[in-house]
Image (cartoon, rainbow, N blue to C red):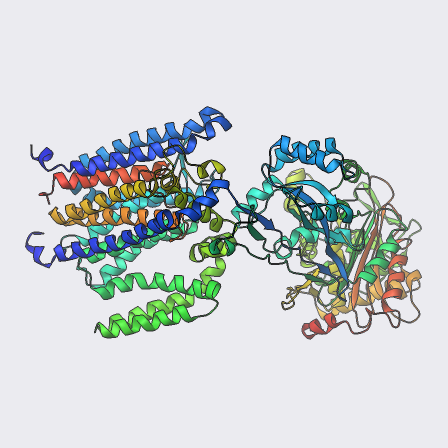
Amino acid sequence: MKLSRDFDWVVLVTTLMLCAVGIALIYSVLHPMVGQYAGDMSYGFLKRQLMWVGLGIVSMLIGFGVPFRWYESLALVVYAVCIVLLIAVLIIPSTRDTQRWLMVGPIGLQPSEFTKVAVLFVWARFLSGHRRNPNRPRTLLLLMAVFLLPFLLVLKQPDLGTAIVFFGLLMPIMYWRGFRGIHILFALSPFVSAVLIIYGENVAHNPWPFGVFIVAIMVIAYLRRSRLIESVSLVVANLGVGLLLPMLWDDLKIYQQNRILNFLDPGADKLGVGWQVIQSKIAIGSGGVTGKGYLAGTQKALEFLPAKHTDFIFSVLGEELGFAGAMVVLLMFSVLIFKALVIAQKTKSEFASTVCVGIAAYFFFQVLVNVGMTVGMAPVTGIPLPFVSYGGSSMLVSCFLVGFLLNCSARWYEY
Amino acid sequence: MAKRDRSSFVAGRERQLTLLILVAVFFTLLVARLFTLQVIRHDEYSRFAKNNQLKRERVAAPRGYFLDRNGEILVDNVLHFQVVMSWRERDDVAAVATGLWAYLPVDTSKIMAHFDAWKKKHGRMAFPIVPDADKFIVSFIKENADSFPELRVISRARRRYRGGELAAHLLGFVGEVGDREISEGANSGKRYFPGDMVGKSALEAYSEDVLRGVDGQDVFEVNASGRIMGEFKKLSTAPTPGRNLILTIDARLQRILEEALSQHGPSAAVVIDTDDGSVIAAVSLPQFDPNEFATGISQASLDRLFNAKSKPLFNRFSQARYPPASTFKIVSAYAALTNELVRADHVLVYCAGGHQFGNRYFRCWQELGHGYMNLLGGVIQSCDTYFYKVAEIMDVDMLASSARAFGFGEKTGIDLPAEVRGLVPDRAYYDRRFGKGKWTQGLVLNNIIGQGENLASLLQVVRMCAAVANGGFLVTPHVIDHIEGEPRVAYPRRRIPHLSGATLRFLRSALEGVVSHPKGTAQWTRLDWMKTAGKTGTAENPHGEPHSWYVAYAPADDPEIAIAVIVENAGHGSDVAAPIVRDFFREYFRPGSTAAVGSDVEQAATGGGGQ
């Protein structure tokens, strides 16, 4: 059996271990609450997380079982379904505080998570085989369009973090597919411009960040000796953003503006997010080398960490299992990312290979942003730690991606 | 085919390696950061974790003031002191309360009852053990800080309405934030905490976002001997105070108008600048003292305010709908002239005290009759019979669209919450209410004299009057002149459609005639030294005596202000409301009066007059 010979057991075992770590930590978070609240209520999270791991394994089997050629053919269909779901979320009134959730019975799902996979598939499809010459500007515009539609829908729901992950996925796969540097810059620069304009106007109160950036891309375009038409359109696109953005900005609601500003300048919100990060740092720092011991954390009980079972679960890890525990978990993620890149190299199908690089980027960004936020290095966004944080949508997506990796590892010889 | 293309597929080992190196670099940064926190600075962080020494307290931002147009402070804040206790269990609180009781005039059982209520509502927030501390208590706590380490004195700002009841319906009141406001605030980026005071009505509510500043916070260690690490010190921020609002109100005139109305029962009045719509005074009586809400109103007072038959919390100038009565004849005359149903000087009827239409007899208010009437006389003497006759040939929608042209049936856009629209009945409305074809033209006979289904707010009526005075512009009545430190707010105004110069001249001479003509219904309000113009009204009302209306502007030749007054259940407009206006004009235009001299508001807006 060829399948079992090439099956990547390391990826599977690492994933399951991470899930186990997540369940153990969620139990630990809930542990001190049991006395305080009704027992059912608190263990409800644990039961549901176990259910999500179960469903995650099913999702992994789907990712593994279906030949990746099918995904390549169905990419646009999956994409269309996700767009419909995103629009549905905007229209259907939601019981939760922000419009990110789609209720399927009692279960809340976040279509924006699934959209990441759909966009990745469509990108990979466009970029594989003879379909598109990566170095033609039209390809680039197409890639941007694929991503812009869900991006704007997601931006309307106040979740900038997810939107940024899209860019985190696009850059590496463009690089992987042999894009020229100027094109990668082209894809990235309008977004950077937008951020710099908002930052300059609202945080730094001067136009320098954007100005310097525009000059910098002109210099880079000149030094790279790119064609004139490319350089000109690069600069025009960025100046266009500069002209349009202030208008769009005024259309945003105050709370949407605030979300973006808090993202760009987390220090400004000292009462809310800033305080949260400090508490997270105290928890992690007080863990020391070996931690206070499993279930023995003190900070988690104090209600200082609001999202301690979801986005801030790494703080609990750092407190109870210390630097050593944190290293082990980071190592496990490194293994996954490394394996994904190895499989990407090995796989013969260009589509599958590109998706594998996207998967590596996905895990990399989620871990970097999530852990970075708990130690005060990255802005606080609603990005969970894959497999470990409590939550369904992220679990289903992460498991599916691992399934896809296993799929590629076993069928690397297929086109 | 893909195979052939393999060479151009650049994803070689080189690119794989680059990506791996990038991952490694960023993860190394994370590891380095974790190493710093968990190994190098472990001791510092564990000190904070161990005793939970790091505390923070919110520093509430002072709420913005209200000032009148002359800079007089109407609303500000005063400091009062509280002794608060950091969160402790019930037994500890009881022990401290007993300790205080030994020295101070405090009631321990009251404190404990207060604590139980506080805990239920506010959870683990610092508990105000003495909510309103006098100087003696404050100095005692400060001197004996060692004996009571868990107590601190904090100062809190309390809203003070300097004029008491003055302009209560304009200013509004503040109250403790509700659970719904907290959760809704969180969605729109505002952060409220239990115990915060927020604007609950009128300007306090309308301008909540401007008045409320941004709270700061104080971060400190509970154990005074410890030093605060730099990064924690940075977390302390000073609050940003709320912005002050400069109102268009003139406190002196507001006082005078309130005084004049208080001689009567429930009543309301609005004075606006005819050119830009700024509200100079706006009164609704009876009113209330907003200070009571600021200090925590007692249930008994609250019940009294809510249940009183005269409804003191009800804003009669922007939230009440009254039949506009004969003041509406301004619109009716405009409708008749603009649609060329009548000519102004053409005698149409002989008024013998009423008008037979179908099987119903419509009465004129003047039972003895007015004799031969043309439109001018119909307005000056407020002859209902004349308008009944006009209504026979006027389409219901014609009247409705004329009313809308003068701003009836829509909000005036005043900067106060919960303004009413009033009601302009039209064909669609009657079809819906009575069924198609199941109503008669008789309804128009009622509408045309401002009765029947016709309902309007005082603001709409005063705005109609101002439009006649300023040459045909519907202004936006407003109370906020500007936010301190910002340019004056520009309020829109629009031209009344199809209002010809001739019609306008007619309306103005008719309203002047109401005062100056020997048979005018407001002839008693004539002033020797200034021409004024107005229209009386008597709103029939099924619940008792009719309401008394008077709407006017002055000076008639070069109008500055328009005023509308309604006194509920007071009888004819000419008897009660008109004299109030006359007295106000006397006061406003009195030589040397502050208002009459150089009102800059007027200068700013005359440019677009277009008369």
Q: Is residue A7 visible?
A: yes
Q: Is residue B609 visible?
A: no
Give me the residue at 26% from left, 50% from top. Answer: A361
Question: In x, y percent, where is residue A412?
Answer: 11, 43
Question: In x, y percent, where is residue A254?
Answer: 52, 55
Q: Is residue A92 above or below residue B255?
A: above
Q: Is residue A137 above or below residue B110?
A: below
Q: Is residue B205 left or right of residue B389?
A: left
Which of the image's four quarters has the C terminus of chain A? top left
Question: In x, y percent, where is residue A138?
Answer: 23, 62
Question: Residue B338 falls in which quadrant of the image?
Answer: bottom right
Q: Is residue A363 left or right of residue A307?
A: left
Which of the image's four quarters has the N terminus of chain A? top left
Give me the residue at 88% from left, 57% from top. Answer: B580
Which is more toward the observer, B89 or A249? B89
Question: Residue A75 falls in which quadrant of the image?
Answer: top left
Which is more toward the observer, A124 or A32? A32
